[in-house]
Amino acid sequence: MRARDRILVTGGCGYVGSHFARAAHDAGSKVIVLDDFSAGTQPKLPTDVEIVRGDIADRTLVPRLLRDQRITAIAHFAGKIQVGESVQKPRLYFDGNLVKSLALLDSVLDSEVRTFLFSSTAAVYGMPDEVPIPETARTQPINPYGASKLALEHALDAYGVAHGLRWAALRYFNAAGAHSDGSLREGHEPETHLLPLVIDAALGRRPPLTVFGTDYPTADGTCIRDYVHVEDLASAHLAALDALDAGKPVAATNLGSASGFSVREVLDTAARVLGKPVPHTFGARRPGDPAVLLASNARAKEVLGWRPVRSDLATIIEDAARARM
Ligand code: UFG
């Protein structure tokens, strides 16, 4: 059996999880989604993807799924994702992202499954000392969201040593875009991410976008981010399963395009791609935003043999817009 044969995808109704579920299905895996529907989205997944409603911390349901579905790997996407909310309600984040994930890992370690992918984040780095950021950079999250994700990475590392768990913590930079056939999309509620807000503002479905800060130490004064296409994220997870099968220690690995765009560049590119201006105003900085976040993706290239193929900004915006039309 290969790790990718029968995958339990937690959070498979969410944004990145649904794209992974679709990619794994299309690549021939049997996919079972476990989701509590708390994100409120019902993605259009192929009908032979089984969707089970439940809690990742359910110590009856999860062991039963692992056994009855003969699961060969877990891809764990379920979790809370809003940085601002994590500052206001840290208990939600330490409970949802850490305590529940530890219960999931207990179920895994009590089973025969030993391959585990974890959806981690560039937020583990906090305010980076250097860019592009290598995985060896200091991890010092500046919000409970990043702290909760980093804590689980530490648990995975220890469980790898003590229990032979084969794991990968894939640290996403700015996940963006949508499935190229338009069937899946980014749909958070409330939506706080730049690209959906930009596209909806251009389409007249939301108020003008506020650019958060124009006095950053960047060429045009706005923040620079590394946008990586959600389909490229999905393919990296499949590559990670194969790398773990081959005995490679994937561990914490950045997933980014290694190219950065400022908020103004995003607005300009979106206006060009969409053929419409993006209504916007300029406002104050948003607390906690680093000026520049840019990945080194050398490790992903080397260990996973991964290359982002849809992560140029125009393609990301085209795909995201198609899925929102
Ligand atoms: N931005 C605006 N106006 C908006 C929304 C965003 O100017 O209305 C700017 C932000 O200030 C930032 C950039 O657009 O400079 C991107 O912001 P997003 O909210 O889309 O994404 P973040 O970079 O804040 O956060 C993303 C993920 C987090 C993850 C983080 C990693 O959403 O989950 O990257 O550092 F933690």
Image (spheres, rainbow, N blue to C red):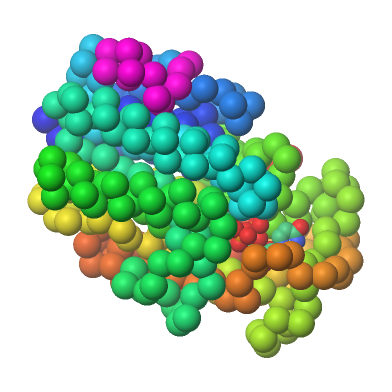
Q: Residue at the front extreme? A: 91
Q: Which residues are magenta?
A: 53-65
Residue 61 part of the magenta segment: yes
> Is residue 36 something one can see in this rendering?
yes
Residue at (46, 49) in percent of width and height: 148
Q: Which x, y percent locates residue 319?
A: 60, 49
Q: Is residue 199 left or right of residue 11?
A: right
Q: Is residue 30 above or below residue 142?
A: above
User: Residue 245 sits in which quadrant?
Assistant: top left
User: Residue 57 sits in which quadrant?
Assistant: top left
User: Residue 262 sits in which quadrant?
Assistant: bottom right
Q: Please tell me in which quarter of the rendered image ligand 1 is found.
A: bottom right
Of 251 and 49, nearer the camera is: 251
Q: Which x, y percent locates residue 267?
A: 75, 67
Residue at (20, 31) in percent of width and height: 109
Residue at (20, 44) in percent of width and height: 159
Residue at (31, 58) in percent of width and height: 252
Q: Is residue 30 above or below residue 93?
A: above
- Quadrant that contains the N terminus: top left
Q: Which x, y percent locates residue 281?
A: 89, 66
Q: Is residue 228 left or right of residue 252?
A: right
Q: Is residue 108 above or below residue 170?
A: above
Residue 168 part of the magenta segment: no
Q: Which x, y percent locates residue 205?
A: 85, 43
> Is residue 47 something one can see in this rendering?
no
The total of numbered circles placed on residues is 0
- Quadrant that contains the C terminus: top right
